[in-house]
Image: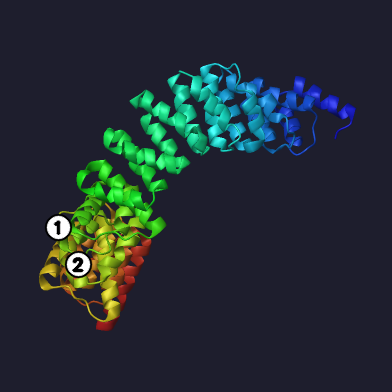
């Protein structure tokens, strides 16, 4: 602890110093044992109206061990200055449980705006100590924003004793219902689960959506079969959420998914139309199906998300001969996931080559070639690169025919790849391409092409 003289000097500097001096003093106290007087003076510097000073105060509050810091900080949540108010709230959250006693003491005689703010903060801290205090506010407060803040916080704090009051709020107004359901899903008690299932058939789609998501978090075996029974009655986003929740319950309890036509259709709709989180659940459930529709649906989303790709990719390697026609058909229209499909095709071909033979039929080869040639005009240099590689790998004669177009590529690495393919090929089109590349503006390209031409001339002589 500083001497009395040193303490008075620090207090003087905090009172009269400029921003740089204040920051230096505050930073020096970060891990020091300090008196309440010094804490009060440090925290009051939020009012200095310098953000650098305010941020140093925040760091002091978070890291210093004085147990009374939050008591001096919390009045700033009532500041009319939005920066100071938010800084105080963010700092209290980062302080965690040591801020909770001051938060609890600050509940009394506050206006609705301040109540909502500190309840939000308490919910984000996650310490259950303020739960009863928040429940008491919920029982008497009539402000919609405060009510929603209480409901959300009680969910975050997993306060089971709040279930009866949450049910009361649920019955007060449909406006509160999705938030109540979300809170019950976080609380996860048997009473919450039973109430959610009971309310499902009576609710609108927004509330049903919240119920389905909550059941995926807290459901049991009975919930799983309840969701299964709703499969045929559910469409759109509700269906996607239902598939997501069924997958969550399957993962948690190792339930068996019935692989019938109804389930397949629900999964495929989710893969085609659902948000990414539901697509990820759906693709994990698709492994039992190998029909044309399933393969095509999976191919249509390939390349959108790495996690999705890694989940469905093994299905494409099981029987490449069956996969090639589907890829060829999709590639004809240059789909949005063109790059992903080209990369997939390249991987499958490399896999087959490694296994000893490539099973592309003549019809598929022709369709692939047509697509690769079209892709030589793509604005995406990677699409052009893969197409060049696939043309030389699958149909070298066609690749040579289109060399005049390839060498006009404006990407240096693509031209280097072309040189790599043609340097050992004897053909008039290759010679013309080398002549063009030997005059390229990129020195690396022109020198390498000239070197290949020179070696050819020496061989001829």
3D distance between C-alphas at marks 2 and 1: 15 Å
Crowding at dot 1, Cα within 10 Å, few <14 / some 14-19 / many 20+, comes out as some
Q: Nearer the viewer, mark 2 or mark 1?
A: 2
User: Which label number is shown at residue 323?
Assistant: 2
Q: Residue 275 appears at what percent x and percent y?
A: 30, 45
Q: Pick the quarter of the image with the C terminus.
A: bottom left
- Residue shown at 14%/57% (left/top)? 332
Residue placed under numbered mark 1 in the picture: 332
Residue at the location (65% across, 32% down)? 99
Q: Is residue 412 visible?
A: yes
**Does residue 76 lie above or below 302 as drawn?**
above
Q: Quadrant of residue 14?
A: top right
Crowd around label 2: few <14 · some 14–19 · many ≥20 (10 Å): many
Task: Say whether residue 304 is visible.
Answer: no
Q: Quadrant of residue 49?
A: top right
Where disc 1 sits, the SS reads loop
- Residue 427 to residue 385: above or below: below
In terms of secondary structure, where does tag 2 sit? helix
Residue 260 position in % (x across, y down): 20, 59
Q: Position of residue 167 (x, y in %)?
A: 41, 30
x then y, percent, for residue 330: 17, 58
């Amino acid at each position: 602890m500083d001497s009395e003289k040193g303490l008075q000097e620090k207090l003087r500097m905090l009172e009269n110093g400029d921003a740089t001096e204040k920051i230096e003093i505050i930073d020096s106290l970060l891990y020091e044992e300090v008196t309440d007087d010094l804490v009060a003076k440090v925290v009051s510097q939020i009012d200095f109206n310098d953000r650098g000073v305010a941020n140093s105060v925040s760091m002091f509050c978070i890291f210093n061990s004085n147990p009374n810091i939050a008591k001096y900080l919390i009045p700033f949540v009532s500041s009319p200055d939005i920066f100071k108010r938010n800084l105080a709230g963010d700092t209290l959250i980062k302080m965690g449980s040591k801020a909770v006693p001051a938060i609890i003491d600050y509940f009394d005689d506050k206006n609705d705006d301040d109540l909502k703010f500190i309840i939000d903060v308490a919910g984000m801290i996650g310490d259950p100590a303020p739960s009863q205090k928040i429940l008491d506010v919920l029982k008497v407060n009539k402000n919609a924003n405060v009510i929603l803040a209480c409901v959300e916080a009680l969910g975050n704090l997993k306060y089971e004793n709040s279930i009866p009051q949450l049910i009361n709020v649920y019955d007060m107004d449909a406006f509160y219902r999705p938030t109540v359901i979300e809170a019950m899903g976080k609380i996860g008690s048997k009473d919450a689960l039973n109430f959610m299932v009971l309310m499902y058939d009576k609710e609108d789609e927004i509330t049903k959506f919240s119920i389905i998501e909550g059941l995926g978090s807290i459901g049991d075996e009975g919930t799983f079969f309840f969701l299964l029974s709703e499969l045929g009655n559910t469409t759109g986003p509700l269906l996607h959420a239902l598939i997501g929740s069924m997958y969550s319950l399957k993962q948690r309890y190792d339930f068996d998914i019935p692989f019938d036509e109804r389930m397949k259709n629900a999964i495929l709709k989710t893969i085609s139309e659902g948000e990414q989180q539901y697509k990820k659940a759906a693709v994990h459930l698709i492994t039992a199906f190998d029909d044309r529709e399933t393969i095509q649906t999976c191919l249509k989303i390939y390349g959108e998300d790495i996690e999705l790709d890694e989940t469905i990719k093994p299905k494409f390697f099981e029987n490449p001969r069956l996969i090639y026609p589907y890829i060829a058909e999709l590639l004809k229209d240059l789909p949005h996931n063109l790059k992903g499909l080209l990369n997939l095709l390249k991987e499958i071909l490399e896999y087959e080559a490694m296994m000893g033979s490539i099973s592309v039929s003549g019809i598929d080869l022709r369709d692939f070639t047509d697509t690769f040639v079209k892709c030589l005009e793509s604005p995406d240099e990677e699409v052009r690169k893969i197409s060049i590689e696939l043309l030389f790998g699958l149909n070298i004669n066609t690749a040579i025919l289109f060399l005049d177009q390839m060498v006009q590529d404006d990407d240096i690495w693509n031209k280097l790849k072309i040189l790599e393919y043609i340097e050992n090929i004897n053909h008039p089109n290759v010679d013309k391409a080398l002549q063009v590349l030997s005059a390229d503006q990129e020195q690396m390209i022109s020198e390498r092409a000239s070197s290949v031409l020179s070696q050819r001339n020496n061989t001829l002589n």
